[in-house]
Every structure is written in structure tokens, then in C-alpha cells.
Amino acid sequence: MQTIAYPKEQMHRFAYTKLTEAQIGAKLAGAAPKSASPLSSVFAGKLLRIVTDNGPTLTYRFTNNNHLSVAENDGRAVEAGYGALTIDDVALFSHLVPGTQRGYHVVVDQASGLATVFEVWFSGFTDNREVQREIYFGYVAEAGKEAPKARHALTNRAEGKGFHWTQDTGVQTLELYPSTFYSNFVELSRQGGELGFCAPTDYVKIDDELYIYSRVECEFSGVQTLYVFDANRAEQVGVRLGFDAADALEYYVFKGRGEWVGQLAQFEKFGDTAATPMPPPANGESLAKGARRVYRPMRNNWQMTKEEVAALTAKDVFGPPSPMAGNKGPVSDYLVGKQLTLRFDNGVAADYRFDTIEALQWRRPGESAWHEERYEAWESAPGVVMFGHLLTGAPQNDCYKLVADFDHGLVTCIHGTIGSRYIANEAQAETWFGVIEMEGTTPPKYRRHQFTDELVGRAVTWNYSPGLTSMHLYTTPHSLSWIIFGESGAGGMEWSGPASYVKIRDELYLAYWLEEACNGTLGTILVNLRTMHDCGIGYHCGKDGLRLSAMGAHARHAGRFDIAKFYQLKA
Amino acid sequence: MNGSTTRRKFFGSAALLAAPLAAGTAVASEDLAARLAALEDANTIGALLRDWARGVVAGKAATPAANISGFTLDADVSITVAEDGTATASVPCVVETATPIDGNETLVEMARQQGDGIVRRAERRVLHGSFVKRDGSWHLASTELRA
């Protein structure tokens, strides 16, 4: 009996219902947060007046531990269900405003008197189900007491942290914060933990131990997960609001316990503890309410039809260097003059003749004619050569990206093709293991390169060219996330895709990632953690043609999350 | 005025302004009015060059190079005034550029979307300006950035 709840479709493939405003209104009617843990009575019977700097003043009367009335800006009070939970002196409560698609998540630090208010609402974006939010900082007003000057604030102090969380609902996640306005989450129990995903995220500092984390799963379900966490004790109280894959309302408060899984490096200047709030528009106007930086790759109009792909004739094979190749290593002549056969365990084989540093010929077994292709090769480590080429005329614009270890007679091929069952110009990949047959060598019978989880949890920065630096976070054995650094060195926008890792030698790994539902690229790199340099090949099909291009970047270690253990198969 | 040359050279406007007007026999023989006029020329030309540099950064003047985001002139401006009503000036400077990264790769597009994707550089160059005097006033005729 299967015990792991793998989804029929992963989040980036799932067609979430485009809920109408009316449907959402109906689902929200009378809703109040549920809780697996007993609700807190911290506010029961009390009055609370919360004043925010640039937002509403909220006057609460808490009837008991699940019922309140709220008046916005001293308007008419309305009654609503609510739920509150506490973590030490900090209380979080959440409620909707009846008759609207709005609500509030409020965090009150009873010790300092400071409060942070998240106003949330639905039907505020093209995708109605996506929770919108605006953050207001303020305080609890007390008669005869001067308003405090301090405020909670957006921060980069949570950047680099990561936790394994187990909610009181039984839900287990890995949540990693490699950015100042995005985060990664791996749904271990809800979805089997195969892939990690990214979502725009707010980080608010309460004090040096307590932070507010709030992500909205934009471009997926649109669900919001917000919690206060204690970085020392790895405890959380939070709220989840939104609609699940079956369009059912998820609205509950939760407690959770976690495990601190590591801390990545930060790359801001020493002393820089600022957040990286969204900059105002260049035209001088104010930011719109709820504005945030969200990567929405499926709205960039890059997708093509099968007919458009079939009609493509333009090809760019190792053409002019792109910004992704600014730090690529020298092209190698290691293969020039060699003749060999690459034989893979799946039965595929190819004979090769390398005529020059950029021209090769290949043929399948039994073919008499040779196919000529342009290639590039790089010798990443002594005797280990990465090279790639198209298979001109192949049915799916196929390419081979190969890593050949001549010292050991081993080869691994990433076979790229164009076209998935979802998108006609999206690359797909298979990994083939095999051997090198050539005069003077005897390949191994059993030894092969192998898939590995040795990179899982690691973060490595990649500087491709001036002004273009990203960080890879190897989130699961089957996915990879990339984080774009801002000018300050703060981690910024993120996205992720399915990935695979093969160990070539110690500290030498072959990795690929698929930019599925993103822009369709298959990126493949040979990561050398001794030279801290990679070589690689991008493979992309777009409206400007088919492209096979070199990549190359300088690396820095950014740390490691101890998370590989969460992906082990358990009996 | 020294009649052996048709050009007057000035190095460093600050030093020029501080120079004594009658410090010795040779200076004393100078025509004081001409000397004052030369000082005024140098100050005007230097100011024109600095105003122009500020205008470049503010987007109010045509840029001598692409993607200039900052333009800091050194203090010392070398000015040569000719008898024909023209002048040239040169000044070492730091030119800051902010050049958008080309390309449509995913990382480049994401960097652009978050407001980055720009290569910033600062280089030392020499700004040369040509000036012409019309109706008693100096005007900037052309500029050029040289290595």
C-alpha cells in the first residue's frame, strides 16, 4: 500500500482552477480559521487597538478565544471568527472581514507593544485565488501611554536560514530562505518531497530570535503560509490561507516544531542588515497596494506550438558568447584527432571522429555515412572532458551533452530533446551511463558514473559575467533552485526546476536542470568543486530558433543545508 | 600680456584664482585688465565644462558615451585660450557607466525583472572640451572623452 502522497501532477504542471470572484466569495462566507491545537485565550475578553503607520487602525473586542469584533479606522464594528496562537510573548491571530474577501493576520509582541498587520485579500490579481497582502507596522495603543518609536521591520536577518517543520496538522515541509524576498519550500508530506518550489516571501524581524515569514505560492495554488518562528528553538505559530488543488478553502492556524537545518552565507557587505524592499516605480509614483516582485515565467509568451517548432530553421550552435559564458574556461583540443565509440547501457551507441577543435563527425552503429556537427569541449579535470553537439536531422532536435572520463573509460550522456507533453518547445532530458571504447583502452564492465545526492542541500554561487551572478541551491535529489543576487549582494528572485546529479569523480559533478514551465531551457553543467569553476551547455528552443550555447562561471561555496536525510526511502 | 605667444595656458583653476596679481616685476608689467579677463575666461570655461558634466548625468545634455550614470571631474582643469576666440579645456575625470546586460537567458531576464541586470563600471578618462566665444560669451562647442 502506497504511503507517500505523490501528486498526479507536480505544482508547476497542475492546472489550478481559475476561480471566479463569486466562487471565492462563496467559499469564504462565514469562514474562520481552524486549528489542530487548542486556540489561545490570550486576548479573550480584552480590547485591543492597533495603530499602524501607513495603514488601518484596528479596534478589536475579543469575546472569547474564537470570536471577535473589529472596527477598521473607527468604522462600524463587524463580528468574525478568529483563531489565535502564541509563542512566548508573541501572539498571532487571524480573521476575515465578513462580507468581503479580505482579512487580517496580526502579530502582536505583548512585551514590546509592537504589532505587524498583514492585510490579505483575494481577487486582487488576474488569478483571483492568489492571496494578496500588504504589510503595516505599528503598535498596540494604550490610553495614557506614549506610542513606541520602534517598529518591526523587513529584514535580511533571516536570509540563509533553513528549517524542517512539522506542523500540528502532521504536515512536514522543508523551508529554506536563501533570498531576502523569496523562499524555497519542499512539501515532504503533502507531495512526497520530490521537487522544491519557490515563492515570493516577506521576512519581518521581531527581534534577533523571532521573525515573521510569509509566502504566497504565486503561479501555483496562490495559498499563503505565514508564521512567526523562533530561530533558536525552531518553533512556529502560523496561519495558512488559500485554496488547495481541489479548490477547498485551507484556513487554519497551526503550531509547529522544527529542526534547524543550516545557515547559508550572506553576500551583502558586512554591516548590511537592511531588507531589499521593492523599489518604487521609475515614474515616481507610489507602489500599488500589495505590490511585490514575482517571477511569472508562464506569462512571458515564450511557448510555441508543435507546428512552430517544426517550422524552425534557425540554429545557433556555440555562436557568439552569451552573458552566461563570460567566465567560461578555454575550449579544449583534447579530443582532436581521436576516434572512439561511446556505448551506453540502454543500447545506444555512437562512433565519433573529432576532426578539429570545433568539428566532429558521428554515426550510429550500422550507418556508413558520418554526420558532421559543430561542438565545443572543455577539460574540467585532467582526463575529464565535457562536450556537446546537436544531432542534426533528429526528430526532436536532439542534442547530446557528454562527460567523458578517459582515465576511467566512462561516459555519461545527457540526451536532450525538444518538446514535452505540456509545451512543444520545452526541453526534456534523459541520463545515459556508458563507456568509452577506443584503441588502447579497455572499458570497465560494471563500474559506471552514478546518480548522487552529495550535492543535495549545498548552495554554490556562480558568477557568469560582470553583473550576472546567481546561486544554485540543490534543494532535493531531483530539483534545483536558482537565486538571482541584487546589487547589494542580497539574494533576490528565485525559481526552480527538476534536476539530476551524477557523480563523475570526487568533487566533480554533472548536473542538469530543466526550466520546465519557465522558459524551457535544459541547463547542464560540470561542477568542479576543486577549481570552483564549471563548464556547461545550455539547450533552448525559442521563437528565435534552436540554441546550443556554452556556459561558464566562477563558483563560491555558500554553505549547506543538512537535508539529504529527509529524502531517504524509508521502510 | 606676453606677446611671444597667441595662446594662454592655465593649469588648475583653483591655483589660478589664488595667484597673486602683482607678485613681481614681470607680473607687474602685465596689463592688469588682460590678466583679469584671462582669469574670467578660465573660470567661465571651467564652469561651462562642469555644468555640462552635471547635465549629462541629469540627462539634460547629450552623452559623450553610452550608459553614463555618473561623471566626476577632477579639480584641475587645463585650459588653453587662443587669440581667435576659441579655447580648449581638458580635465581628468571618472566616468561611471551602467550598462544593461544583453541577452534573453533566464537569469538575465530575472535580473532585469528585479531591477538589476546592469553592469556598473567606473573608469578614469580625460574629458576634452572645445569652446568658442560669441558676442563676448563663451560657449561649449564640443566634447570628447579620451582614454
Image (cartoon, grey):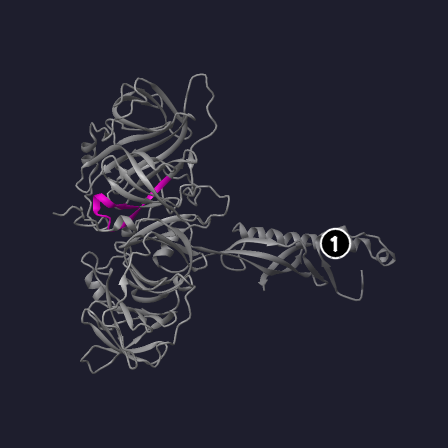
**Residue A131 shows up from this direction:** no
Residue situated in front as seen by the camera: B59 or A538: A538
Q: In the figure, residue A506 lies in which quadrant?
A: bottom left
Q: Is residue B100 above or below residue A66?
A: below
Mark 1 belongs to chain:
B
User: Does residue A533 show up?
Assistant: yes
Q: Position of residue A202 (x, y in %)?
A: 36, 40
x and y percent of residue A214 in the render?
33, 38
- Residue at the extreme right: B25
Residue A526 vertical position relative to residue A203 in the rendered view, above or below: below
Q: Is residue A506 left or right of residue A391?
A: right
- Is residue A138 shown above or below A320? above
> Is A283 colored magenta in this rendering?
no
On the image, numbered disc 1 is attached to which residue? B16
Q: Secondary structure at mark 1?
A: helix
Q: Which residues are magenta?
A: A185-202
Q: Would residue A501 appear left or right of A114 to someone viewing this image?
A: left
Instruction: Determine the residue positioned at 81% across, 52% down.
Output: B21
Whole-percent x, y for residue B5 in the image:
77, 66
Q: Is residue A200 magenta?
A: yes
| Residue A459 appears left or right of B49 | left
The crowding category of the residue bearing disc 1, from other C-alpha atoms within 10 Å (few below 14, some 14 to 19, many at least 20), is some
Q: Give the residue type at disc 1.
A: Leu
